[in-house]
Amino acid sequence: MTEDRNLIFDKNDVCIFIPVLNEEGAIKDVIEGFKNVGYNNILVYDGNSKDKTREVAAAAGARVVIQSGKGKGQAMIQAFDAMTEKYIVMIDGDGTELPEEIGTLLYPVLEGKADHVAGDRIAGRTPGAFTSLNLIGNRMINWFFRRAFRSKHRDILTGYRAFTRESIQALDLKQNGFVIETEMTVECLMKGQKFMEVPITYLPRPEKVETKLHPIRDGYRISMAAYKYSRFYNPIFFFGVWSLLSYLIALILIAAHPFITWHSSMLGTAFFFFAGIGTLLLIAGFVADISATLHRKTLKAIQANQNEQKKEYDQF
């Protein structure tokens, strides 16, 4: 048993989960970093690396599993289904995050203050940790997410997280690629879990480790996934985007009317069409939002009742 910050817990109850792909140049330091602070239950899920990632991880003392499919999301879903430990700490294997900061993420979970804790890399980034393009992209995606989900999250794309096994098994995760972090955050919000962000140090990627993230392609996929998920959590935003676009087209038609003398009746018809579509979409958003709000309240009541029943059962 180990005592930290007035907490008594067995560090073997914490699984350090590291999904990797071609991380030979950094994985040893990551594993040794956790061992140096007393965490020896380390699980590496390898996405069929072409280098010596598996050999290096095994030699450093980690359990190594080769995932059955492709993509970071698939590795995470496969691993979560097989885990039995009470607590899980997930970290990238590229050496950009510090294992010794594990307590910053894990302690709120151990104390019951959070079901899921995410490390905010943007708050603690060091010089060179983000390229200019990646930093702009991250800020744009997080800004979009905050508007879509009416949240205050600063870094939904972080790979350094801590959570309970119960909380992760309650999430309905399906994404196979880098969208998985966004899906995890959305699912936490949808399921009403206690979600917390804490600042962490974010270091430049070692030169010997290549990034697998494509800023434009993956940024687009993540943004589109967040927008798709918003229809369940914030329907006003989901329908409002198209409503705003329809109103914008209607305004352009009105502005163009004085300069187009022919087919003015057609312009008028088109204006009323797009204005009407925009209004209908806005109404649909409000109606769907009422339904979504009632659904969340019902789900929250069910979860509260289940928690109460669990407490009564534990007393016996």
Image (cartoon, helix red, strand yellow):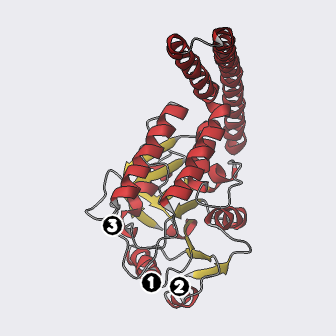
Residue 50 position within the rendered picture, expressed as x and y whole percent measured from the top left = 59, 86
Seen from this angle, which residue lies furthest front?
262
The residue indicated by pointer 3 is 203
Q: Position of residue 271 (x, y in %)?
A: 63, 13
Element carrying mark 2 = helix
258 relative position to 129: left or right: right
Q: Is residue 172 above or below residue 152?
A: below
Name the quadrant containing residue 207.
bottom left
* 74, above or below 164, in the image: below
Ranked by sequence position, the earlier of labels 1 and 3 is 1
Q: Amino acid at mark 3?
A: Leu
Image marks 2 and 1: residues in contact by CB distance under 8 Å: yes
Residue at 67% x, 37% y: name it: 307
Residue that badge 1 annotates: 28
Question: Label 3: few (<14), some or many (≥20) within 10 Å?
Answer: some
Residue at 45 percent of width and 83 percent of height: 28
The residue where tag 2 is placed is: 57
Task: Name the kind of residue labelled 1 in the image.
Answer: Lys
Separation (CA) of disc 2 from disc 3: 21 Å
* Residue 85 x %, y %: 62, 64
Residue type, numbered disc 2? Ala
Q: Is residue 181 among the parts visible in the rendering?
A: yes
277, above or below 314, in the image: above
Say whether residue 276 is left or right of residue 214: right
Q: Nearer the viewer, mark 1 or mark 3?
A: 3
Residue that appears at 69% across and 14% down: 273
Residue 209 occupies which quadrant of the picture?
bottom left
* Proximity of marks 1 and 3: CB atoms separated by less than 8 Å: no
Disc 1 to disc 3, C-alpha distance: 16 Å
Quadrant where the image shows the C terminus: top right
Q: Does any portion of residue 159 appear in the rendered image? A: no
Q: Position of residue 243 (x, y in %)?
A: 61, 22
